[in-house]
Image (tube, grey):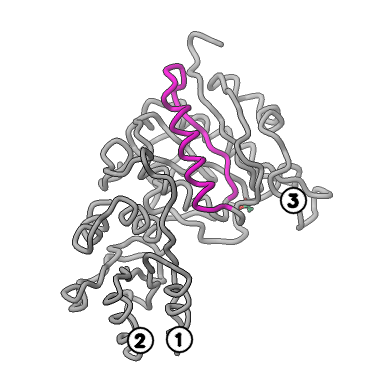
Amino acid sequence: MSADRPRIALLATGGTIAGAAASRTATGYQAGVIGPQALLAAVPELADVADVQAEQLFAIDSKNMSDALMLQLARRASELLAESGVAGLVITHGTDTLEESAYLLHLLLKSAKPVVFTGAMRPGNALSTDGPANLYQAACVAASPAAAGLGVLVVMNGAIWSARDVGKQDAAALHAFGSPHGPLGRLAGSSPRFYRAPSRAHTLHSQFSLQRLHALPPVGIVSAWAGMSAAPYEALAASGARGIVHAGFGAATVPDHLLPTLRSLRARGLPIVRASRTGAGPLPCTSDLQEGGLLADDQNPLQARLLLALGLAHGADTAGLQELFMRY
Ligand code: SIN
């Protein structure tokens, strides 16, 4: 342990950053098979940045992430952040559901210390893998006092994103992540440069907490398609969903033939939040708000699902749920 380097914790959960392919050019690979010590060993330059203590929490392909695992991740992250010697936290995660885990922790963690998610689009042994550079830059951000108090961050391909509005927008490119509002900052080599800060509530200013939160209530998403049927709504309601996010067309619109179904589900006590399947844009208020309809503001359907689930878990009523979408 060095007196002049901060100590940061690395929590490994699997993903492509910990993936290995049969050869340097193979397209198929297995995610989550390289342990955190090997990830660190691939980036000896980390020793210039921080003392890194690593632990493996999961070793999964993040397509297998679940609400229960996300809560487990939030709990372990919370314990590590409570350690006085830990200055910041890096979480390695598969990119496929990284934005969901990052947003849940953004709403739940009670710490101003930097928390930085990162991953990779190419496995560790691929030609021009991005994992080591992403891990290095994530550690640079986690070790930086400038990153404190900004909520949970995502570092990928030289950009620093807020967990509030980042999303995976490309299945293959190294610049896979984006946000309608742009990055909070960029890295000049090892130096994080921030250009803006999140204005919506998070972490220390969030009303949500891990205490007494044992599970998230089931909330599903139905994506609209031209000519869609009501079947997915009825199926979700029958499966015991406590809320539904409607990923609607454009400004989160609902086809006319579906309105009676949504009204009837709302009358049965099932909140329906309208988000846009475009994933961006502040939604205009429409008359269904008077009837108990809910609007996700600009949140994409994935993030709206988590906020709705947390609101329900904390006992928010319809008006309270709508307020959440304007506050977070
Ligand atoms: C995963 O999400 O675990 C696999 C894909 C990736 O990390 O890019």
Which residue, given by chain and number where applicable, does mark 3 sit on?
30
Secondary structure beneath label 3: strand
Q: Distance between the Cα atoms at labels 3 and 2?
A: 42 Å
- The circle drawn on residue 228 is 1
Q: Distance between the Cα atoms at labels 1 and 2?
A: 8 Å
Vertical order, 88 against 207 (above or below): above
- The circle drawn on residue 190 is none
Callout 1: few (<14), some (14-19), or many (20+) C-alpha neighbours within 10 Å? few
Residue 177 in view: yes
Question: Residue 38 vs residue 84: left or right?
Answer: right
Q: Amino acid at mark 1?
A: Met
Which residue, given by chain and number where applicable, does mark 2 sit on?
258
Callout 3: few (<14), some (14-19), or many (20+) C-alpha neighbours within 10 Å? some
Residue 196 in view: no
Q: What span is in magenta?
A: 65-94
| Residue shown at the point (56%, 30%) measured from the top left | 10
Query: Is the CB atom of the residue marked by disc 2 within 8 angstroms of ligand 1's nearest atom?
Result: no
